[in-house]
Image: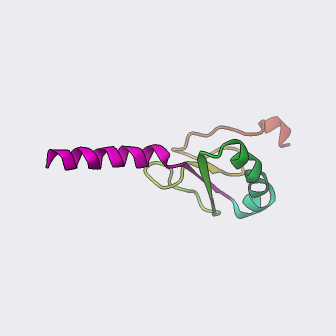
Amino acid sequence: MRAFAQIEASLAALEASTERQTLTVSTLPSFAASWLVPRLGKFMEQNPEIEVRVEASSGLTKLHGGRVDIAIRHGLGDYPSYDVQPLIARNLCR
């Protein structure tokens, strides 16, 4: 029985090492269609080990414990309980 357990553990480790990492991005449908998706081909060429999934939604996404890894939203960054990193400086948005 111990030998079977070792074989199973080895197979699980092998499968895990060959799986691609997945990055799930949530963003507005308009941003996904006009900016993000057209640029994904180049990113995936440069990073073939990462599978990117795009979730187009206008609502705020649950990041903690959810299936989404990162969310991109338009606004001034006033999103309580979220770690906000501006992509464009506020003074450039005026």
Q: Residue at x 60, y 47 (%)?
A: 50
Q: Position of residue 79 (x, y in %)?
A: 59, 47
Q: Position of residue 48 (x, y in %)?
A: 64, 46
Which quarter of the picture shows residue 91? top right
> Which is nearer the eye, 76 or 23?
23
Q: Residue at x 70, y 38 (%)?
A: 86
> Which is nearer the eye, 10 or 30?
10
Residue reaching furthest to the left:
1
> Which is nearer the eye, 14 or 52?
14
10 up-or-down from 40: above or below = above
Left or right of residue 74, residue 18 in this image:
left
Colouring rule applied to residues: rainbow
57 up-or-down from 88: above or below = below
Question: Range of the magenta residues?
Answer: 1-27
Number of labels in the image equals: 0
Q: Quadrant of the C terminus?
A: top right
Left or right of residue 70, residue 10 in this image:
left
Q: Position of residue 78 (x, y in %)?
A: 63, 45
Residue reaching furthest to the front:
3
* In magenta segment, residue 29: no
Left or right of residue 72, residue 11 in this image:
left
* In magenta segment, residue 12: yes
Q: Position of residue 65 (x, y in %)?
A: 43, 50
Left or right of residue 6, residue 90 in this image:
right
Q: Residue at x 75, y 52 (%)?
A: 41
The majority secondary structure of the magenta stretch comes to helix
Q: Residue at x 71, y 44 (%)?
A: 76
